[in-house]
């Protein structure tokens, strides 16, 4: 079993290249299945979720070749729209296959989404989209089937702002007959990236990036080339790393505008930030101020950044409060932080953090990708060694978590434990 060992590292300093966004890549790779010719995607990260998509693609006859920094996709010989339920449940965004293959083939059989478990992650808005476009949805215990003799454009109002269902609606409607209008749509960069990509193939999607998107259905999509946007969530976590013990970290190859709320909050608590055209530098001043954060859908403060921010706020003297409005139960990292000595209380959808208290290394478990980042940052600030299990969750989202953190001076190592061994008899692998 793999685990990560982190040690107190002092100030972190250096430059880090930010890879392509996981959440955009998962949409783009599936969106490519809609094309009628070869597609090349640049900047797709080498992460476990992408490997699962590669496995599903093999099963259904979609060729997917990784060539250097590019993924070349040949969707011309897809022979099946039946997605293995085990693979579908191994990550969250498998629901995009439902929208895309429904759009192209009129019927899809697929397992329920997996991914990070925040207690409740409904897909009712995805189902609402399929039904509005004229499809029938049949739910079985391990899988669901979506089918339609013909998809027809419709007006769809989202009851809640959801990036996943907004993207799925574009995938499902892009080849539907006539006009689809989405109201109360998500405005996330990943929504815009997917629309830009589809339009490059010949789709007619207007208004992505606003809360009202219009899609005029087309019957054919060309091939084409597209570069995925940089991962704003990984960038945000590295900027927070600069504040942990007071250091200077530059994230390169980013779109600073995608990190507006994160940068504003960092400034507010005393981490100075300086933006260039495609890089951001964060300067930890060594003195952090407590604050209050409420997550929200983009352009609000991302729920995916509240966990690493919790690690940072543990270093800020005084009382901070983090409220997660998007996933009110997304606090699995909190009991783990308490094992390191953190003083955090959970009440309803908020974490009350008493910052400035010393942390002490220990064994902790990452139950989801951002909880992993949070524990890693806390481990770099704690006295002694922190050992983090649940590496498979971290590797769902991070291409080279060890190498990238080591490059800014973090003392972390990937270790391997024999399943028979007890903690205490651990051997270092590398
Ligand atoms: C693979 C991927 O891109 N994952 C991201 C995506 O997840 P995901 O696409 O699952 O999240 P959504 O944007 O859909 O969810 C936003 C909110 O809408 C709610 N909702 C969503 C769909 C639905 O049918 N019904 C419903 O009520 C959710 O419970 C949540 O409160 O956006 C989340 C919110 O920014 C991020 O944390 C995830 O990293
Ligand atoms: C929640 C996340 O991922 P997923 O939606 O894929 O579970 C995340 O990236 O933080």
Image: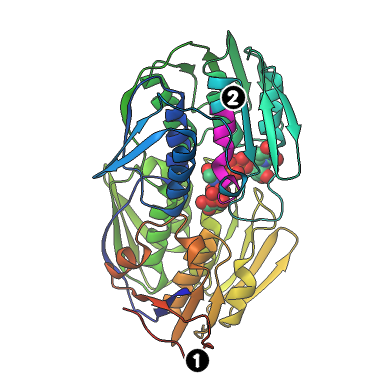
Measuring 38% from the left and 53% from the top, which residue is drawn there? Answer: 235
Label 2: element kind: helix
Q: Furthest-bottom residue in view?
A: 424
Residue stretch rendered in magenta on the structure:
88-100
Q: Nearer the viewer, residue 282 or 325?
A: 325
User: In percent of the image, x 40 and y 62: which residue is there?
Assistant: 271
Magenta segment main secondary structure = helix
Cα–Cα span, label 1 and label 2: 52 Å
* Coloring scheme used: rainbow
Q: Is residue 309 visible?
A: no
| Disc 2 target residue | 102
Q: Nearer the viewer, residue 363 or 379?
A: 363
Q: Secondary structure at mark 1?
A: loop
Report the quarter where the C terminus lies.
bottom left
Going by the image, does 4 lie left or right of 14? right
Of label 1 and label 2, which has the lower sequence position?
2
Q: Can the viewer see residue 156?
A: yes
Question: Residue 424: which numbered mark, if any?
Answer: 1
- Where on the picture, by quarter, is residue 20? top left
Q: How many marks?
A: 2
> Measured along the vertical axis of the image, is residue 424 above or below residue 261?
below
Q: Is residue 89 above or below residue 414?
A: above
- Taking the spot 52% from the left edge, 78% from the top edge, the residue there is 356
């Amino acid at each position: 079993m793999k685990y990560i060992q982190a040690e107190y590292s002092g100030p972190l300093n250096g430059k880090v290249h930010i890879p392509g966004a996981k959440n955009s890549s998962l949409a783009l790779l599936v969106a490519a299945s809609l094309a009628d010719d070869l597609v090349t995607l640049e900047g797709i990260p080498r992460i476990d979720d992408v490997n699962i998509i590669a496995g599903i693609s093999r099963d259904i006859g979609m060729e997917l070749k990784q060539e250097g920094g590019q993924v070349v996709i040949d969707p011309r010989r897809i022979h099946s729209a039946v997605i293995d339920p085990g693979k579908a449940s191994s990550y969250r965004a498998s629901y995009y296959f439902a929208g895309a293959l429904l759009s192209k083939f009129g019927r899809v059989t697929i397992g329920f989404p997996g991914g990070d478990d925040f207690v409740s992650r409904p897909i009712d808005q995805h189902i609402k989209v399929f039904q509005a476009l004229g499809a029938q949805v049949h739910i079985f215990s391990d899988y669901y089937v979506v089918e339609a003799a013909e998809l027809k454009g419709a007006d769809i109002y989202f009851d809640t702002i959801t990036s996943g269902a907004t993207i799925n609606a574009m995938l499902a409607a892009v080849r539907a007959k006539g006009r689809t209008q989405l109201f109360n749509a998500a405005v996330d960069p990943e929504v815009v990236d997917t629309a830009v990509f589809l339009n490059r193939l010949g789709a007619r999607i207007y208004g992505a990036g606003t809360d009202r998107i219009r899609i005029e259905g087309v019957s054919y999509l060309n091939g084409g080339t597209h570069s995925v946007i940089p991962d704003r969530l990984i960038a945000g976590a590295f900027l927070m790393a600069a504040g942990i013990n007071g250091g200077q970290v530059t994230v390169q190859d980013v779109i600073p505008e995608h990190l507006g709320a994160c940068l504003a909050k960092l400034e507010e608590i005393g981490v100075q930030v300086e933006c260039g055209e495609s890089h951001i530098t964060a300067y930890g001043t060594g003195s952090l101020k407590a604050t209050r954060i409420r997550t929200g859908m983009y352009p609000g403060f991302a729920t995916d950044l509240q966990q690493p921010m919790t690690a940072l706020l543990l270093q800020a003297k005084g009382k901070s409060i983090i409220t997660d409005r998007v996933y009110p139960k997304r606090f699995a990292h909190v009991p783990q932080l308490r094992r390191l000595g953190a003083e955090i209380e959970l009440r309803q959808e908020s974490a009350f953090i008493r910052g400035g208290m010393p942390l002490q290394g220990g064994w902790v478990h990452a139950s989801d990708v951002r909880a992993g980042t949070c524990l890693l940052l806390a481990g770099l600030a704690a006295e002694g060694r922190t050992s983090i299990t649940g590496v498979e969750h971290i590797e769902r989202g991070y291409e080279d978590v060890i190498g990238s953190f080591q490059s800014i001076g973090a003392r972390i190592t990937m270790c391997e434990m024999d399943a028979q061994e007890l903690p205490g008899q651990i051997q270092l692998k590398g």
